[in-house]
Image: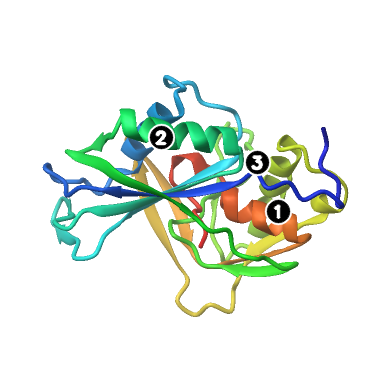
Amino acid sequence: MAVTSQDSPRTDMRLKLYLTPNKQLVPYTYPHHLTGAFHRLAGWNGVHDKISCYSIGWLRGRGSKSASDGLHFPNGAEWSISIHDRNLAERVRQNAEQLPHIAFGMRIYRVEEQPTPAFGSIYRFEVGSPVLVRSSVEEDSTRKHLTFRDPEADAYLTETLRKKLQVAGYSGAHLHTLMGFDRSYSRAKTKVVEIKGIRFKGNLCPVIVAGTPEAVQFAWEVGAGHLTGSGFGFLH
């Protein structure tokens, strides 16, 4: 059933998973290990959907220590996951008790549901992980990684969000929602992230979403840009 501008279903869930300290060094290329852990918790056995109506954050921990080749979380870490499909989110929460191992000796010891903020028709989001924006496929089958400096990046951010809205069943005014980088942010920068030997150039720059309050909330749930299911574009 399509979700019209009059409908506002409460389906989302953001979970915060509390993890024990790591027993092995956490390499800087760790995000794909979180993707694998998420798929185990979701019960997908490695089956990836074509478009992710969920977003996976990075590890955050007080007192984390950087080494030349990785990270230590002596006080444990927090890992946030945001999911539009509440049934899937409930499955993840339930499986967290049965499958607590994440990676590098870290295990889940507590799971909390985070409250959903009250969003209006426009909201500026901070990013919890680099936002990846890729162009359409070029003639040589490659895709250019766009940065916040590229004016066309906003069009791809908007296009990706609208596709996800459609997949989730939204229609009408929701599909007029816009997403773009906040170029007034003076500390914006790019960051290269390596996943399984492939290097991606992401953006550490806030994004602004304008649309219906439901669509703005949806953006908070599913993240910004491409590969949100692989750790990019997590929003706060």
Which residue is rendered at x = 23% and y = 40% of the image? 107
Mark 1 or 2 closer to N-term?
A: 2
Relative to 169, 35 lies left or right: left
- How many other residues sit within 10 Å of disc 3, few (<14), some (14-19) or many (≥20)? few
Q: Quadrant of residue 32?
A: top left
Q: Nearer the viewer, residue 53 or 201?
A: 53
Mark 1 or 3 closer to N-term?
A: 3
Q: Nearer the viewer's eye, disc 1 or disc 2?
A: 2
Q: What residue does disc 2 label? A: 38
Could you tell me how far apart the alpha carbons at marks 1 and 3 are, in whole angstroms?
14 Å
- How many other residues sit within 10 Å of disc 1, few (<14), some (14-19) or many (≥20)? some
Mark 3 or 2 closer to N-term?
A: 2
Relative to 208, 226 lies left or right: left
Label ID, residue 158: 1
Q: Quadrant of residue 220?
A: bottom right
**Residue 92: x %, y % from top left:** 45, 34
Q: Nearer the viewer, residue 228 or 16?
A: 16
Describe the element under mark 1 as helix, strand or loop.
Answer: helix
Q: What residue does disc 3 label? A: 136
**Residue 195: x %, y % from top left:** 36, 39
**Residue 194: x %, y % from top left:** 34, 44
Could you tell me how far apart the alpha carbons at marks 1 and 2 are, in whole angstroms?
26 Å
Type of amino acid under label 3: Ser
Describe the element under mark 3 as helix, strand or loop.
Answer: loop
Type of amino acid under label 2: Phe
